[in-house]
Image (spheres, rainbow, N blue to C red):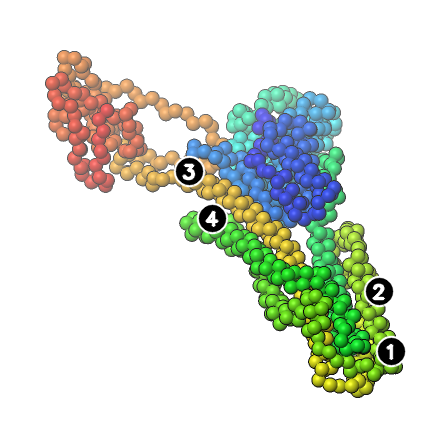
Amino acid sequence: MATTFVSVPLKKSSEVDLAKPLSKFIQSTYPSGESQAEYVKAAEELNSLRKSAVCRALDKHDSSLEILLRYYDQLCAIEPKFPFSENQLCLTFTWKDAFDKGSLFGGSVKLSFASLGFEKTCILFNIGALASQIASEQNLENDEGLKAAAKYYQLASGVFQHIKDTVLSTMNRELTMDTSPDTVGTLSLIMLAQAQEVFFLKAAADKMKDAIIAKLANQAADYYGDAFKQCQFKENLPKEVLPVLAAKHCMMQANAEYHQSVLAKQQKKFGEEISRLQHASDLVKTVGSRYDEYINVKDLSDKIARALTAAKKDNDFIYHDRVPDVKDLDPIGKATLVKPTPVSVPMSQKFTDLFVKMVPLAVQQSLSIYNQRRADLVNRLIAQMRESTNLANGVLASLNLPAAIEDVSGDDIPQSILDKSKAVIQQGGLQTIDQLIRDLPGLLQRNKEILDEAMRILDQEEVTDNELKAKFKERWQRTPSNELYKPLRAEGANLRATLDRAAQADKVVKERYATNSEIIALLCKPEAELNAAIPSGNPTKSLQGSEVIMLLKTLLASLNEIKKERETFENDIKSVQFDMTSKFLTALAQDGAINEEAISVSELDQIYGSHTQRVQQNLKKQEELLANIQAAHEEFSKSKQSNTDANQREEILKKLAAGHDQFVELVGNLKEGTQFYNGITEHLLKFQTKCTDIVFARKTERDELLKDLQQSIAREPSAPNIPAVPAYQIAASVGGTTPAVPTPAPRTVFQPKPQPPARPPPPSIGSNVATPTTTNTPAVPAPVASVGGAGVLTQAQGPPYPTYQGFPGYYPIPMSMAYNQYAYGQYSMPYMYQPPGQPPFQNPQPPQQPGYPYPPQQFYQQ
């Protein structure tokens, strides 16, 4: 606080590690590589910047203000790029009230809040506070100092106004008193008033016209008056703020009247000149008598006094102009040259975004949804092609094709069946399936344990929060855990449902394996054993080289080409890549929001439209080929010979073909299941980390809140208020009237310093009162109280001391009026004389005084 200018103290905060949680989010969100390393380094630089801006003492210099501005700009830059919230990227910031000086029991009023908006609000407050301190340090004797002071006061005013109008409306929680809307609004007005005063000082130094100077001073007085009115009920502000504002209001009004009187003299309005000078003189006298310890107005008072003396002398001897009442004079105009500097980001001209390559969170979310849409489209196309392939294989297996038209001798294994057997053996046969099936339960159990541990952490913290809520009731002011964890619990429920569906799919795969294990085992046998297991018989020997067989071979070759074509399509679809970042960034810049669905649907249709069309043509072509194959096979079936051995051979060949297809499908399903479990493990670990981080942040917030509660409880009075003094304990004043209990003046009324009461007259000794004496102790005179104008010895009112006859060392003590009967100690207790040879006094209890409303007090020996 400067002598004549108000400066705002800085808020203080505890250290917060920004690097660790931000780096963890970056590593879990962005793929490893150059970009990830660059983002992690930027997070460490941001953490260092906060330490410089918050965790060290700031000099009242431009360089310190620049650090605060850069840190605030970085906060604004990263806010849309990271999911700062209580249930995602949870960072708890703790800030103390700037105006709270703590108490006897320690600590200051502070608040811990998991909100980046809270951090931004406190940094903005410190920007305004430091700007006010820098302005108060300027040398106002030169032009550069005046310009700098005006600039910084307007900056401080704009910052405090921005907090009131913009920032606080986004907060969903009441903050400390220093950042409340009323307080920052008042501070903004104070800073604006001081900026206006600086312009008044510059105008006076530049010797501008008195009419302009008077208007500037009058406007400054108006600002100070409004600030004074707003400050009257701000108990959290420093005690010296209110008298400074009151003094400045009077002083600036006096300056306005003085310069307006000069203008009146120039206009030969000598009576008005005197009236204004008299009013100015009264104002500076008020300042000198009430606020002399805050504002020195001696120079101004002398200047006004000299001008008033000269004006009166001239008017009395020369002009004889009537002196009007100041209320009848025309009001002085107002001219403002100041306005709050608006806050616009970036505030620092040297700002460089540390995360310039990182896209905003809205774009990240849109990209995530777009990628999901793209994955759904790709999976749907691939699923259609694979289902079509399975359908074709199933139809051919049911028709025993191509084995039926390859079986010429009736004794050898058809080449197609032999190729299928070799394929099964090369892939490991039953051993591969058995190993994959054995691995699934372990993978499933591992994922369930991760999920269970994450939910257990949430449950444990929620139980603790509920217990503290039940204990402290309305004092426990923070977001309940059961509400905060709703998104996490919903995500956990989705993950658990996914695991349950995966377990059910595992069960279906195992059942299919049990059904087809025998035929797959047969395919795994050596060629000789496989040939022996197939019955002999050739019903198609007579049809070799016929037209129907040639047709079937042609159709089967076409079907194989279609299936190979689908494999190419699948690889092409998977390899399509398109970065939608630029599209979403453009939409965000143009519209301020992203219509993800419209943009994504349009782009996906443009990118994958041709692929979808080719897939549909392929599926339609296969459908026509299968119809032709079935028709040709029906004709083939009518032409071939039929016998029992041939039928059995054909049946086993069908089963072998179907067994191969089942093996391929089972291995594919099991590998997909293994890949799924390994993939979801990463998601579950991220989910568990998210739960751990939020619980740790909640624990930190809980510890801070508990500490604040303990301090607030310790500051509360533990004993009841001292009761009012009984009427009969108040000594009667002269004249028989009882003085009224003085009422303290309101905070807004400035009383002169309290003076100590006048010393009482020396006591007189009456002749009828004897004082016990001994040979070793001189006689103690008994004081006399004068009541009703007559000198009468009387016992002074006070605590009920022992008064029975023979009590050694007793003498009446004169007490002041309105004496508190409880406020006695070792310095107000009666003198206790102990004659030699007598036993020591053993705490005798005084008798109950008649009409005394309280129990007798314990007497303690001194």
Seen at 80% across and 68% down, the residue is 563
User: Quick one: label 3 or label 1, which is nearer the N terminus?
Assistant: 1
Indicate which label's residue lies in the foreground, 4 or 3: 4
Number of the front mark, 4 or 1: 1
Looking at the picture, tell me which residue is in the foreground, 684 or 279.
Answer: 684
> Can residue 285 be seen here?
no
For marks 4 and 1 on the same chain, the one whose residue lies earlier in the sequence: 4
* Residue 814, quarter of the rendered image: top left
Q: CA distance from mark 3 to mark 1?
A: 101 Å
Give the crowd class for mark 4: few <14, some 14-19, many >=20 residues within 10 Å. Answer: some
C-alpha gap between disc 4 and disc 1? 86 Å
Q: Is residue 231 above or below residue 627?
A: above
Label pair 2/3, CB-CB below 8 angstroms:
no
Secondary structure found at label 2: helix
Q: Please, what secondary structure does the residue beneath circle 3 have?
A: helix
Asked if disc 2 and disc 4 are in contact, CB closer than 8 Å, the reply is no
Q: How many marks?
A: 4
Q: Is residue 617 left or right of residue 130?
A: right
Which residue carries the number 1 mark?
Answer: 550
Secondary structure at badge 4 equals: loop
Residue 610: which numbered mark, if any? 2
> Mark 4 and 1 residues: CB-CB less than 8 Å, in contact?
no
Disc number placed over residue 484 in the picture, else none: none
Q: Which x, y percent locates residue 127?
A: 64, 35
Q: Nearer the viewer, mark 2 or mark 4?
A: 2
Q: Closer to the N terminus: mark 4 or mark 3? A: 4
Give, as a three-letter code, the residue at label 1.
Met
- Observer-side mark, 1 or 2, equals 1
The residue under label 4 is 476
Marks 2/3: CA–CA distance? 75 Å
How far apart in space, not on screen, are marks 4 and 3 (Cα)? 17 Å
